[in-house]
Image: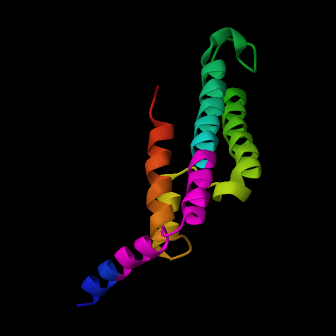
């Protein structure tokens, strides 16, 4: 069946994608970049969220952490955190930082199965609360 062919093709592609030391070296560089990028993206976004939740540091200064200024501050902090990490790590790993995005790129065959699986494992490890 076609599913069996897809699975065997995917397994063959994983094997062929990891034959030489140069292949492994590129995978390790991408995994390290993805780990550092995912961790720093989440840490910066979490730090901004925590800072905005402190009543006395409210953007509007009224002690209400749910005011529109704080919500905009957190949204921009997430956006800038992602943009900075994408700018830094895109040349090394592709800058996905999200297992769902990595899976989608594997499905449309923009990313090899081996690289995608390695990056997904690293992204989950980086997103785990320490």
In the rendered image, the quadrant that contains the N terminus is bottom left
User: Which span of residues is magenta-colored?
Assistant: 9-33
Which residue is drawn at the image coordinates 72% and 31% (left, top)? 73
Image location of residue 79, percent across then percent down? 70, 44
Q: Residue 32 magenta-drawn?
A: yes
**Relative to residue 82, is residue 15 drawn left or right?**
left
Residue 28: within the magenta? yes
Of residues 70 and 1, the one drawn nearer to the viewer in this rendering? 1
Q: Is residue 72 visible?
A: yes
Q: Residue furthest front?
A: 21
Instruction: Point out residue 81 in the picture as x, y percentages from the top left corner.
Output: 70, 39
Q: Residue 115's x, y, as percent?
A: 51, 63
Instruction: Answer with left or right where residue 54 lies relative to residue 116.
Output: right
The secondary structure that dominates the magenta segment is helix
Percent x, y of residue 61: 75, 13
Q: Residue furthest top?
A: 56
Residue 103 seen from this side: no
Q: In terms of image quadrants, where is residue 54?
A: top right
When the figure is inspected, residue 15 is found, relative to residue 94, above or below; the finding is below
Given residues 53 and 80, the one toward you in this image is 80
Q: How is the image coloured?
A: rainbow
Q: Is residue 29 left or right of residue 111?
A: right
103 relative to 35, above or below: below
Q: Residue at x 63, y 33 (%)?
A: 45
Name the residue: 72% across, 29% down: 69
Residue lying farthest left?
1
């Amino acid at each position: 069946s076609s599913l069996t062919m897809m699975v065997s093709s995917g397994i063959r592609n994983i094997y062929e994608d990891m034959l030489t030391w140069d292949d492994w070296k590129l995978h390790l560089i991408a995994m390290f970049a993805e780990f550092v990028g995912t961790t720093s993206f989440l840490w910066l976004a979490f730090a901004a969220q925590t800072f905005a939740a402190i009543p006395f540091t409210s953007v509007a200064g009224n002690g209400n952490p749910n005011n529109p200024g704080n919500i905009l501050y957190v949204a921009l902090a997430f956006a800038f955190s992602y943009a900075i990490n994408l700018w830094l790590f895109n040349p090394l790993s592709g800058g996905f930082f999200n297992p769902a995005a990595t899976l989608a790129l594997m499905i449309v065959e923009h990313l090899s199965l081996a690289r995608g699986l390695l990056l997904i494992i690293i992204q989950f490890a980086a997103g785990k609360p320490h």
